[in-house]
């Protein structure tokens, strides 16, 4: 239990956790606003295949866009748990795990808005 207490008192860990929570919220809200604002009469563009030609855009359902929200939540929870479990072994390893989670969440936002 002392490792968990030290974990939540570490300023760098709290900064990275806050950034990851903000990025998860940003990814969730950006996908939800995109679903609300777009007309779903003919589906959502979820893929682009350059080798097909004119019909390179593939449409999909709402579920394919909601999966970006699920991915962001899974990344946030998994990185927090992994970082918490590795903090007592090495502080730098826990910080690296949180940093890589930040990178994954940024890439999720970029790909989700593409």
Image (spheres, rainbow, N blue to C red):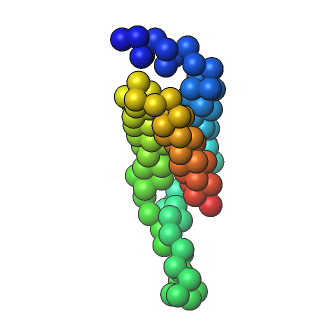
Q: Is residue 29 visible?
A: no
Of the 4 image quadrants, the one containing the N terminus is: top left
Residue 87, quarter of picture: top left
Apparent side of residue 31 relative to residue 70 in the rendered image (left or right): right
Q: Is residue 100 visible?
A: yes
Apparent side of residue 87 relative to residue 34 in the rendered image (left or right): left
Residue 9 on image: x %, y %: 55, 14
Residue 110, quarter of picture: bottom right
Q: Is residue 61 above or below residue 66?
A: below
Residue 35 on image: x %, y %: 55, 48
Residue that appears at 48% across and 49% down? 68
Which one is in front, 105 or 67? 105
Residue that appears at 46% across and 11% down? 5
Q: Is residue 24 above or below residue 18?
A: below
Tell which residue pokes out farthest to the front in this image: 90
Q: Is residue 21 above or below residue 1?
A: below
Residue 65 on image: x %, y %: 48, 53
Residue 15, quarter of picture: top right
Number of on-image labels:
0
Residue that appears at 56% across and 83% down? 50
Residue that appears at 58% across and 53% down? 107
Which one is in front, 14 or 2? 2
Of the 4 image quadrants, the one containing the C terminus is: bottom right
Apparent side of residue 100 relative to residue 83 in the rendered image (left or right): right
Residue 56 on image: x %, y %: 54, 80
């Amino acid at each position: 239990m002392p490792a968990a207490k030290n974990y939540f008192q570490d300023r760098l860990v709290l900064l990275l956790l806050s950034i990851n929570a903000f990025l998860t919220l940003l990814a969730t809200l950006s996908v939800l606003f995109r679903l609300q604002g777009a007309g779903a009469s003919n589906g959502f563009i979820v893929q682009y295949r350059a080798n097909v030609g004119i019909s390179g855009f593939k449409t999909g359902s709402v579920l394919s866009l909601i999966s970006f929200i699920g991915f962001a939540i899974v990344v946030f929870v998994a990185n927090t748990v992994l970082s918490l479990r590795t903090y007592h072994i090495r502080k730098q390893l826990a910080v690296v795990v949180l940093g890589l989670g930040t990178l994954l969440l940024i890439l999720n936002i970029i790909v989700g808005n593409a």
